[in-house]
Image: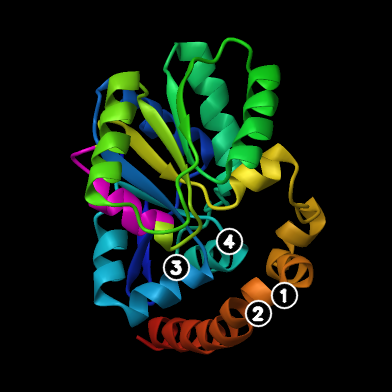
Amino acid sequence: MHPEQHAILGIRVNAGDYRHAVRQILGWAHDAQSCYVCCAAVNNIMEARRSAGYRRVMEEAALVTPDGMPLVWMLRWLGARSATRVYGPDLTLAVLSAAAAQGVSVGFYGGTDAVLSKLMEVVCRRFPQLAVAYHEAPPFRPQTNQEDARTVEAVNRSGARILFVGLGSPKQDRWMHAHKGRVQAVMLGVGAAFDFLAGVKPQAPHWLQACGLEWLFRLATEPRRLWRRYLTQNPKFVLLALGQLWRARTS
């Protein structure tokens, strides 16, 4: 069964939990489906409002999980009382655990060579039974058509049925959308999960995450890269979300 879903500022978000997400992802992997999963935060919703092309990316995802607590709160206020956060790094660990138990091979695409090397050490240590069939750190520049074709061929030839994509959002979501039907795997856009799990970037304490203040921690640790995203997008989201909730209540 598909999880309950609601439109947040016009963008569909699913209100499932980790167990449901993992069950769906592994089911698609066993069926050798080519599809993708977006872990959505405020930035994704605002980008989808700004860009019709990115809105289409979000709409065509097989699953859109509430990666940020503001989206969880919105889902609950819109009627999905049992909605919980399905956070990219934690979803990564849950899927890896299930894949190891069920003999499903996985791959990793994103990050840098140094990050991937550390990530492979962590993953192999935590999940010794896991079959890692593929990993690649792409160049930061756009790939040529020939390079992209080689990447697709390498992923498909590896036999990986689940591909974790860590290119940062919204870049990773656009990449997955462009490769749906070409990459024969379930693609998961997991954002900074590679950096967090490899231990190369600090992760916000759980109490800050639960309060919906992870963005403040990340802003403090990466101000030059993230200030525009958080200081311009978050206030706009709050105002628009309050407007949606007011309209829903009065109607």
Q: Cα distance, mark 1 to mark 2? A: 5 Å
Q: Circle 2 sits in a helix, a strand or a loop, which is it?
A: helix
Q: Amino acid at mark 1?
A: Pro
**Above or below — where is 157 with respect to 191?**
above
Label 4 Cα neighbours within 10 Å, binned few <14 / some 14-19 / many ≥20: many
Q: Cα distance, mark 1 to mark 4? A: 19 Å
In the rendered image, the quadrant that contains the N terminus is top left
User: Could you say which quadrant of the image residue 14 lies in?
Assistant: bottom left
Q: Circle 4 sits in a helix, a strand or a loop, which is it?
A: loop
Location of mark 1 (residue): 223
Location of mark 4 (residue): 68
Q: Cα distance, mark 1 to mark 3? A: 19 Å
Q: Earlier in the sequence, mark 1 or mark 4?
A: 4
Main SS, magenta residues? helix
Q: Which residue appears at 44% of the width and 68% of the height?
A: 44
Magenta span covers which residues?
172-182
Residue 139 picture location, percent across and down: 46, 50
Q: Cα distance, mark 2 to mark 3? A: 16 Å
Give the label, 2 or 4, closer to the camera: 2
Give the label, 1 or 4, closer to the camera: 1
Location of mark 3 (residue): 44
Res 3 visible? no
Q: Nearer the viewer, residue 36 or 113?
A: 113
Q: Cα distance, mark 3 to mark 4? A: 10 Å
Location of mark 2 (residue): 227
Residue 248 picture location, percent across and down: 39, 81
